[in-house]
Image (tube, rainbow, N blue to C red):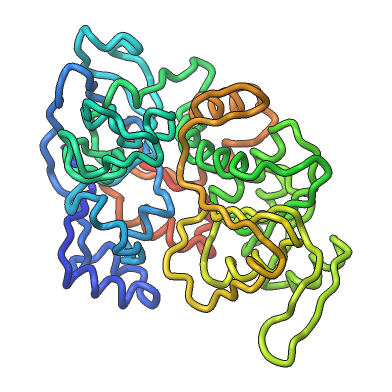
């Protein structure tokens, strides 16, 4: 089968890391660790696994980080050095054993890709998996799989940027008939956004800021509108097309930081005070109760801390790494809570405990007014993988939000 594969080569990785900020095409060149090649169809591991034919798979910001050499090496011990990309996946079951009861051959499924004690065949689950916190599994290097966090980063399973992959029975969710493939491929990132909002759920009447209007930022806005909460949603959007989508998803006020002063707008909107120290950036007293940072760059983290009112919360939705230059003074001086948010697991919401994926599927099913279909902006066949990645990288030129591979 054809598949886009990553194989770690340290010199190539360092070249990509050094050059990618200036020359984006390096990520798809022969000098990178990525290539399209013929790969064997993954073997079934045991009777608890199924084989899936890929129908559609998305390109995620985390994929682009690896392609461009921007991922922290702190994660290397928990990942395979060779794998097929693709963890946002919709597929069709093509093979299963009689012991798998939750799906049938021919079923369309969406994949929860996370590897856990269950998928690894660990006999004694770790404390986090026993509590349902599969995203915090403590056995990422144990069991009968190589080190890896998920399908799409795992040597044995393959991923959605290939024609076939395998998944544990616990990772497959039968797709409701009314879902299109385009809607279904957004369930995984929707679950990411849902988990982040529920990490620090805003109080009624809160003013909330979402930094960034890529896929996760836009879906975070959508989640804030779909959940039963009254809050005013502010969002930042770098491009005009993102501004339009942020409003369509439910943002009340959208700020373009290239055209407007974010601090001046937020001071006016929230009634905060602004101060200018003798040296350094401006300081805000007041601000919003919640910030969801879907970018998590040093600049946005610093802004998030400054724009959050005393006692408020910042949730790092984006994959923050080496945050040089972030002033942590607001964390202790104004007791700002900073929370990480990593993918999804289970949620406790209004007295009900359920898996994030089930919750996300239900939200999407019940909220047809949210124009999810507008987020799928580009579709490519796997042979055009270089063009697909370049399109996803150059959002300002391509107006791309979610770029996907199709296999039908």
- Residue drawn at the location 72% of the way across and 38% of the way down: 225
Q: Nearer the viewer, residue 214 or 203?
A: 203
Name the image quarter holding residue 305: bottom right
Relative to 274, is 183 above or below? above
Query: x, y (%) of residue 75?
Result: 30, 57
Relative to 296, is 206 above or below? above
Q: Is residue 165 left or right of residue 208?
A: left
- Residue drawn at the location 68% of the way across and 91% of the way down: 279
Q: Nearer the viewer, residue 36 or 281?
A: 281
Relative to 339, is 12 above or below? below
Quadrant occupied by the C terminus: top left
Relative to 180, is 325 above or below? below
Q: Is residue 283 left or right of residue 169?
A: right
Query: x, y (%) of residue 243?
Result: 68, 56
Query: x, y (%) of residue 46?
Result: 15, 21
Q: Is residue 211 left or right of residue 65?
A: right
Q: Is residue 152 left or right of residue 45?
A: right
Query: x, y (%) of residue 51?
Result: 22, 24
- Residue drawn at the location 20% of the way across and 47% of the way down: 83
Q: How many marks?
A: 0
Quadrant occupied by the N terminus: top left
Residue that lies at the very extreme toward the bottom in this rendered image: 278
- Residue drawn at the location 74% of the way across and 76% of the way down: 283
């Amino acid at each position: 089968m054809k598949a886009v594969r990553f194989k770690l080569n340290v010199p190539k990785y360092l070249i990509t890391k050094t050059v990618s900020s200036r020359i984006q095409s390096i990520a798809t060149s022969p000098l990178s660790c990525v290539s399209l090649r013929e790969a064997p169809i993954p073997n079934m591991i045991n009777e608890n696994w199924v084989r899936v034919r890929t129908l559609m798979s998305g390109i995620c910001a985390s994929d682009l980080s690896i392609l461009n050499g921007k991922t922290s090496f702190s994660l290397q011990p928990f990942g395979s050095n060779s794998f097929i990309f693709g963890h946002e996946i919709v597929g069709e079951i093509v093979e299963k054993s009689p012991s798998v009861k939750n799906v049938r051959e021919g079923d369309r499924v969406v994949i929860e890709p996370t590897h856990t004690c269950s998928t690894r065949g660990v006999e004694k689950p770790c404390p986090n998996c026993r509590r349902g916190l599969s995203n915090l599994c403590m056995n990422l290097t144990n069991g009968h799989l190589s080190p890896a966090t998920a399908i799409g980063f795992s040597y044995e399973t393959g991923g959605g940027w290939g024609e076939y992959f395998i998944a544990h029975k616990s990772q497959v969710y039968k797709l409701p008939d009314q879902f299109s493939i385009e809607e279904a491929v957004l369930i995984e990132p929707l679950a990411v956004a849902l988990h982040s909002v529920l990490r620090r759920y805003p109080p009624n009447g809160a003013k909330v800021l979402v930094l960034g209007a890529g896929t996760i930022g836009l879906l975070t806005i959508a989640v804030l509108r779909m959940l039963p909460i009254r809050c005013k949603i502010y969002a930042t959007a770098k491009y005009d097309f993102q501004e339009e989508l942020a409003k369509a998803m439910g943002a009340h006020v959208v700020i373009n930081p290239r055209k407007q002063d974010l601090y001046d707008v937020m001071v006016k909107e929230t009634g905060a005070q602004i101060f200018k120290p003798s040296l350094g950036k401006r300081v805000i007293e007041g601000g919003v109760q919640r910030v969801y940072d879907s970018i998590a760059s040093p600049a946005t983290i610093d802004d998030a801390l400054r724009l959050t009112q005393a006692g408020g919360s910042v949730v790092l939705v984006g994959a923050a790494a080496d945050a040089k230059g972030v002033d942590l003074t607001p964390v202790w001086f104004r007791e700002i809570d900073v929370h990480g948010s990593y993918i999804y697991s289970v949620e406790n919401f209004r007295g009900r405990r359920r898996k994030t994926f089930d919750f996300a599927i239900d939200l999407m099913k019940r909220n047809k007014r949210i124009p999810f279909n507008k987020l799928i902006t580009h579709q490519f066949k796997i042979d055009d993988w270089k063009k697909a990645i370049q399109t996803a990288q150059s959002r300002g030129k391509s107006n791309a939000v979610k770029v996907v591979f199709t296999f039908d």
